[in-house]
Image (spheres, helix red, strand yellow):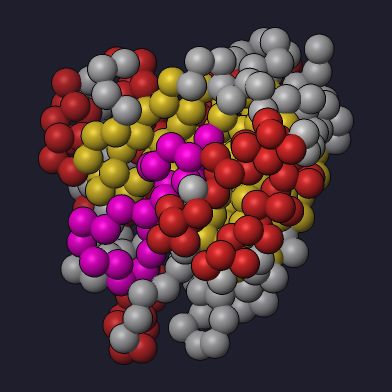
């Protein structure tokens, strides 16, 4: 049995990468993370372990809007959302409005493992982290000069923006994600983000909401989304894509494209999705000009695409 792995580092207009390094840096990062995920899948690790692992590597890379690279809210603070889902049994774990935790996706995994609840937020999530003996990191681990400048520009422009968004006139959107199918044909999905630049404190996007920013079901597919969270929430986009596989018999390519068509038709949505279906096929679709992603399909070569 072969494995598949797909990761993303946000959608948007990548022509003007003013807050990040070059395209080469993204390519290098994406391929390195895919190869580290491959090692784990080849040795038989579960899809759930591998999506948590790959998402945590993306959270630890300041290129992306998640973990230490998170954007700032309107108060100049970092509030992160993350979730993951196991396609074997639809178990899920999520955290929202989380501060000072290096890897939100790993706390989400602890929520899943604990089993009592699906989503913990704010102080309650921090209390749970303490219970799990997960250490907190100081604010200055997360807050960088580049993010302070990005927030100031968004505030001057008087708007909320996505991470990779140019204030004027176009976009590059934040969020990271991973989807995998392991050698036992199990699916899992993970998504993590710092959310929108200049967002209101307490705002929660699609990322930690099962069915909106993340979904996995062994019978259909595993999906991770990136884009304006409100639009993905209103269209329940990740579950909609799973439904396209389940009820219309689509594969990953057809279902992701149908999902983005629906997002645009219904709410003029901006963003992208990645998915692996139950046969191990990888696909992505987006309504933006770019989507940073990489994939290994059925044990093949690692690929990276930004456009
Ligand atoms: N899709 C990430 C967010 O809107 O928070």
Answer whether residue 101 is magenta in the image: no
Residue 107 shows in the view: no
Part of the protein shown in magenta = 193-215
Instruction: Tell me if residue 245 comes above or below residue 78 in the rendering.
Output: above
Residue 132 lies, with reference to residue 96, above or below; the image says above
Seen as rendered, the residue at the extreme right is: 300
Q: Main secondary structure of the magenta part?
A: loop
Q: Looking at the rendering, in which quadrant would you find the C terminus?
A: bottom right
Report if residue 128 is visible in the image. Answer: yes
Image height of 2 relative to 74, above or below = above
Where residue 6 sits: x, y (%)? 68, 38
Residue 215: x %, y % from top left = 53, 35
Residue at x-position 30% and y-position 67%: 199
**Residue at the image position 72 percent from the left and 45 percent from the top:** 255
Q: Nearer the viewer, residue 74 or 241?
A: 241
- Foreground: 167 or 24? 167
> Which residue is rendered at x = 86% and y = 30% of the image?
300
Looking at the rendered image, the quarter that the N terminus falls into is top right
- Residue 20: x, y in percent? 54, 67
Q: Is residue 205 magenta?
A: yes
Left or right, residue 101 beside residue 44: left
- Horizontally, is 268 left or right of 247 in the view? left
Name the residue nearer the viewer: 270 or 289.
Answer: 270
Residue 94 drawn above or below residue 253: above
Left or right: 176 in relation to 121:
right
Quarter of the view holding residue 269:
bottom right
Count numbered badges in the picture. Answer: 0
């Amino acid at each position: 049995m072969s494995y598949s792995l797909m990761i993303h580092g946000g959608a948007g207009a990548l022509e003007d990468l003013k807050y990040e390094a070059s395209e080469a840096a993204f390519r290098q990062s994406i391929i390195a993370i895919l190869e580290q995920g491959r090692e784990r899948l080849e040795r038989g690790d579960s899809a759930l372990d591998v999506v948590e692992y790959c998402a945590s590597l993306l959270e630890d890379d300041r290129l992306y809007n998640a973990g230490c690279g998170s954007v700032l809210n309107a108060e100049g603070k970092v509030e992160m959302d993350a979730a993951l889902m196991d396609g074997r049994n639809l178990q899920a774990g999520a955290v929202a409005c989380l501060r000072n935790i290096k890897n939100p996706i790993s706390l989400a995994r602890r929520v899943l493992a604990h089993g009592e609840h699906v989503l913990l937020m704010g102080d309650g999530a921090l209390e749970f982290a303490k219970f799990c003996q997960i250490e907190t990191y100081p604010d200055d681990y997360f807050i960088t000069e580049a993010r302070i400048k990005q927030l100031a520009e968004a505030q001057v422009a008087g708007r909320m923006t996505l991470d990779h968004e140019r204030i004027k006139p176009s976009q590059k959107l934040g969020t990271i994600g991973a989807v995998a199918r392991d050698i036992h044909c199990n699916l899992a999905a993970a998504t993590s983000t710092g959310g929108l630049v200049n967002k209101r404190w307490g705002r929660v996007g699609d990322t930690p909401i099962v069915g909106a920013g993340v979904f996995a079901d062994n019978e259909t597919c595993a999906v991770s989304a990136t884009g304006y969270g409100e639009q993905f929430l209103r269209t329940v986009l990740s579950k909609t894509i799973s439904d396209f596989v389940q009820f219309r018999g689509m594969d990953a390519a057809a279902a992701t494209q149908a999902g983005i068509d629906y997002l645009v038709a219904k709410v003029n949505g901006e963003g992208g999705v990645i998915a692996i279906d139950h046969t191990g096929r990888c696909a992505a679709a987006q309504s933006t000009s770019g989507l940073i992603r990489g994939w290994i399909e059925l044990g093949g070569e690692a690929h990276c695409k930004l456009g």
